[in-house]
Image: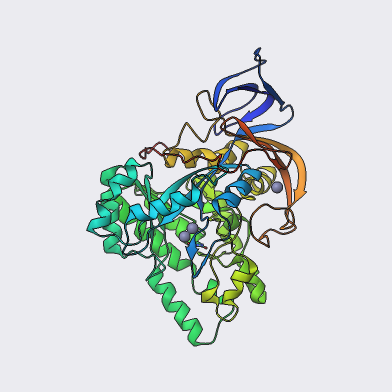
Amino acid sequence: MQTLIKNGHIVTATDDYVADILINDEIIVAIGKNLNVRADKVIDAAGKLVMPGGIDPHVHLDMPFMGTFSSDSYETGTRAALFGGTTSVIDFILQKQGNSLQSAFDEWNGRANGTAYGDYSFHMAVTDFNESTRSEIKNMVDAGVTSFKAFMAYKGALMLDDKQLVGLLEEVKKQGGLVNVHATNGEMIDYLIAKHKSEGKLAPLYHYLSQPEVTEAEASGRFTDLANYTGCPGYIVHLTCEGALNAVRERTQKNQKVFVETCIQYLLLDASLYEQNFEGAKWVMSPPLREKKDQETLWAGINQNLVQVVATDHCPFFWEQKLMGKEDFSKIPNGHPAIENRYELLFSEGVTKGRITPNKFVEVISTNAAKIFGMFPKKGTIAVGSDADIVIFDPNETHTISAKTHHMNVDYSGYEGWQVNGKVKTVLLRGQVAIDNNECLIPKGYGQFIKRGKVKQII
Ligand code: DUC
Ligand code: ZN
Ligand code: ZN
Ligand code: ZN
C-alpha cells in the first residue's frame, strides 16, 4: 500500500520545507518536491504543517496507585493520545517490592498487548533493588526495556534509598541503559505531610505546601551527582521549578550531564489553583504545580537546551477517585489527565505565542525523546527509512478543550475552556491513517510494542 502526502509544510527538529512524502506500508520511502508516483491513497496537506507524531515518554496507564488505578487503560489512553497527535508513549512498569522485574513486565505486557491503539514501550520502575533484581537488569535491556525508573519518594511503596540508587545506577551503566528518576526528597515530604496533618491542615493546598521547591532542588542535585559519579546516563522526570533547574544548571557548568523532562502542566498552570477548596484536587500531582516564575524558568530552560523533553505524567483519576482524599489531602490520588492535550497545547502556548520555534517544538514533543530512549530514527522524525508516524496539523484552526469532547477516560479536564490555536487534523501511525477529522480509523490492538535500543548519548 502506497500513500502520498502532498504539498505539506514539513517541520522536523532541524528542517522546515514544502515537499511530498511517499509511504510504502509502514515506512517513509521518499521525500521530494512534486513526486511523480502512483499511490493508492493521496492526502492533500497544502497549507498544513506535517510533523512527526508526538512521543510522550511519561504516562501511567492502568496503574495501581494509592489504593486505586489510573483511569485510562492502554485502550483508552493510547487512543486519546492519537486524537491529540501522540503516536507513541512510554509507560512505567512498577515492580512490586519483593517480586521480580520479570513478573511486573509480564503483567504490564498482558495489559498492553492486543489492546493498545498507539505504539508503546516501557520503562521499568525498580522499587526494590537487591542482588536478585540486579541480575534481571540485563534481561530487561535485552528485551528492549532500556530505561529504569527510581523513585526518591513514596517511601514504603516505591522509594529507593541512596544505597539502592547507587547500586542501580552502577548496574544500569554496566548494561548500557539509563536511569530516570522522580527526584524529590521523600523523607522531607513525609515529615511535612505528617506535620500538616497533625495541625489539622487537610485541604489540597497542603499537598502543595508539603512539597516545597527545596525538596525537588535537593534531590535533583543529589541524583545528578550520583549519576555522574557512576557514569550512568540520568534523566530527571517531571522537573517543575527554578531551584531544581538551577541545581542541574550548576552541575552542567562542571561538565556533568543529565537529561531533563518537564511536563506541559508545569509550563502552563500554577499553584494558585490549589487555593480553591477541594476543587484544587484536580491538580494534585507530585511534584505539585509551582509559581509563575518557575514557568518562565522552564520555558527559558527549553530554549537553553537544559530541558530536552516536554511530557505529561498523564495519570488520570475520576472525580469520584479524587474524593478519596476529601478529608485528607494525602489520600488524594496523585495525577492529572493530559495525554490528549500536550501536543496542541504546547504548539498553541509555545509556537503560536512565540516562546519556542516550530523546530524546537518538534524536538521536545518527539525527537529528543526518541533519541534519549533509543528509538531514533525509527521514531521521532520525518525521514526516509523512518516509521511513517505523522501529524498533519492546521496551525490556524482554533478549538476549545473540554471534558465533554475529549477522549480520555476521565470526567474532568485540567484545561476546561482553554482556547487552543492549532488542531491535529490527520494522524498516521506506521503509514495507517489512525485519526482523520475527529474519527479513529484503526482497530484496537493496532499499537505495537517498541523494542528500544541501548542508550546513546547523542543529544
Ligand atoms: N506523580 C503523579 O502525580 N502521579 C503518578 C506518579 C507521580 O510521581
Ligand atoms: Zn513521578
Ligand atoms: Zn509519573
Ligand atoms: Zn484538540
Residue lying at the far top in this picture: please name it.
Answer: 36
On screen, residue 72 versus residue 455, left or right, reads right
Residue 55, placed above or below residue 224: above
Percent x, y for residue 244?
45, 59
Rendered position, 47 above or below 37: below
Give the colour scheme shown. rainbow
Residue at 76 percent of width and 48 percent of height: 399
Which image quarter is the N terminus in?
A: top right
**Residue depicted at x 58% and y 51%:** 77
Q: Position of residue 219 (x, y in %)?
A: 39, 63
Q: How far across and down, in percent of the image, does residue 163 sit?
A: 26, 63
Which of the two residues, 126 or 110, is positioned nearer the viewer here?
110
Q: Residue at the spot x=47%, y=31% of the render?
A: 377
Q: Residue furthest bottom?
A: 199
Q: Is residue 321 left or right of residue 102?
A: right
Q: Is residue 402 visible?
A: yes
- For residue 277, what is the image quadrant? bottom right
Q: Nearer the viewer, residue 403 or 213?
A: 403
Residue 272, visible in the rendered structure? no
Q: Quadrant of the C terminus?
A: top left
The total number of labels drawn is 0
Left or right side of 190 for 364: right
**Above or below, 337 relative to 358:** below
**Residue 433 position within the rendered picture, expressed as x and y whole percent measured from the top left:** 65, 33
Could you tell whether 415 is left or right of 144 in the image?
right
